[in-house]
Amino acid sequence: MEPVKIKLNPIIDFGKMPIANAFLTKEQFKDEFFYDMVLGYDPATHAIGLVNTVPPEHMFHDHYAFFSGTSRAMQRHFRETAEKLLPYAGKGMVVEIGSNDGIMLEAWKELGVRAIGVEPSANVADVSKSRGHEVIAKFMTPEVADEILSRGKVSLVFGANVSCHIEGFREYLECITRLIGREGAFVFEDPYFMDIAEKTSYDQIYDEHVWYFTLSFINAVLDPLGFHVFDCEHIETHGGELRMYVGHKDTHPVKPVVGEWLAKETDIPGKLELLKTNIIKSKIVLLEILNRLKKEGKRVCGFGATSKGVIVTNYCGIGPELIPFITDTTPVKQGKYYPGVHTPIVPQEEFKNVDYAFLFAWNHFKEIDASQDRFRKAGGRWITHVPTPRII
Ligand code: DWN
């Protein structure tokens, strides 16, 4: 069968955007890289993705700023996921694409399963290697697939928040289906477009996220390869994701739950149009809130210098005049400036003497709220923009 061809028609134009994980020093302001961020849709395959992509070397390199291990809840999540997927690990190896600092490789190690990480950002891969993990510090290519297969049989390939980053998605799936063959499984979890549309969480749209997945799209790409999604489950991480299980059509019958989720994916063009309208409304209301707090002389800061927050601040035009600083626990982000809007980022220890904190890390709300009792007790209030801008 012919491989799919994807042609994205522009739908939502966000204007110029910086690279979401490119935290800057003052000296770097003048050379900052911007691109036109436009979300597009292909009616033939239901692909939703960025019309203009950024070369991966600009985003994933030896100073990548996101370390998966920064959240306790995510550490727990990966441990529980490894336990859940243990039956798929079989007698072969597990391969994790985008293994970052080794948060999940550690879980496999504890479970006594041989796991190989594939991670192109050298600095995070080094953290993982220093913990004794087997990591190939490269992008996933046919050559890397050969290298892995030369090391042994693969039972399971796993990827969390990485598959949506890969521009050559069809070629990537070709590599993975070669790795797992007819018997193995590929399990991946990424932001689900239906959640983004429902929650107006437009801040999931940025340079690293080339694709916004639906089951309909994944099956369209897999079908000519002889594979399909045979199982899926909705998970709450990162604001709503779909975990999909891929296997060969002859060996993995489709479970009824897949049909149930597919049935929800109706009228994707209509949902994109509604998202477009809701994004504009969200910007207006959020700016009203922040301007009012400023007029009232309230002290406001940002909490969590996330990639997502870069989109909200740049799209809405929220600079240090409305949010003077952002706190974050990641050492490599501290002392730097937020892409595009150049808001200073400070250690979390400096999270004090504020009345309102904008939750850029809204996806970690439960963990953050539980850890910031003092802020709440002192009368502090959170601001969020998901699903609609409001003070909590
Ligand atoms: O897909 C991706 C996701 C999984 O991670 C990548 N493209 C990049 C990254 O996106 P993000 O930056 O939006 O991820 P998070 O997990 O929402 O980032 C949380 C940020 O907040 C980190 O910089 C750590 C920080 N944080 C904090 O300062 N205090 C987090 C917690 C829980 C805290 O208590």
Image: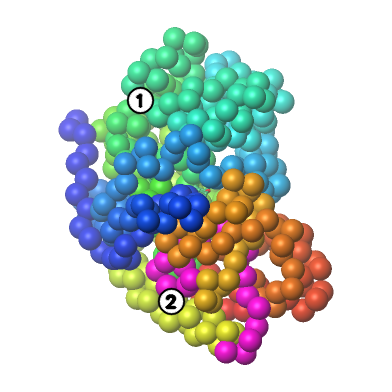
The N terminus: image quadrant: top left
Q: Is label 2 within 8 A of ligand 1 (CB to nearest ligand atom)?
A: no
**Residue type, label 2:** Lys
Location of residue 253 with respect to 146 vertically, above or below:
below
Q: Is residue 6 visible?
A: yes
Crowding near pointer 2: few (<14 within 10 Å), some, many (20+)? some
Q: Secondary structure at mark 1?
A: loop
Indicate the position of residue 169 as horizontal and vertical percent values: 32, 38
**Residue type, label 1:** Thr
Q: Dot 1 corresponds to which residue? A: 141
Is 311 colored magenta in this rendering?
yes
Q: What residue sits 43% from the left and 38% below the top?
A: 60
Q: What residue sits 60% from the left and 42% below the top?
A: 68
Indicate the position of residue 224 as horizontal and vertical percent values: 25, 33
Q: Dot 2 corresponds to which residue? A: 283
Q: Image check: 48 left or right of 252? A: left
Q: Secondary structure at mark 2?
A: helix
Q: What residue sits 42% from the left and 56% below the top?
A: 29
Q: Image check: 115 left or right of 307? A: right
The image quadrant of residue 268 is bottom left
The span picked out in magenta is 295-319
Is 196 colored magenta in this rendering?
no
Location of residue 19 with respect to 87 vertically, above or below:
below
Q: Is label 1 within 8 A of ligand 1 (CB to nearest ligand atom)?
A: no
The C terminus: image quadrant: bottom right
**253 or 246: nearer the eye?**
246
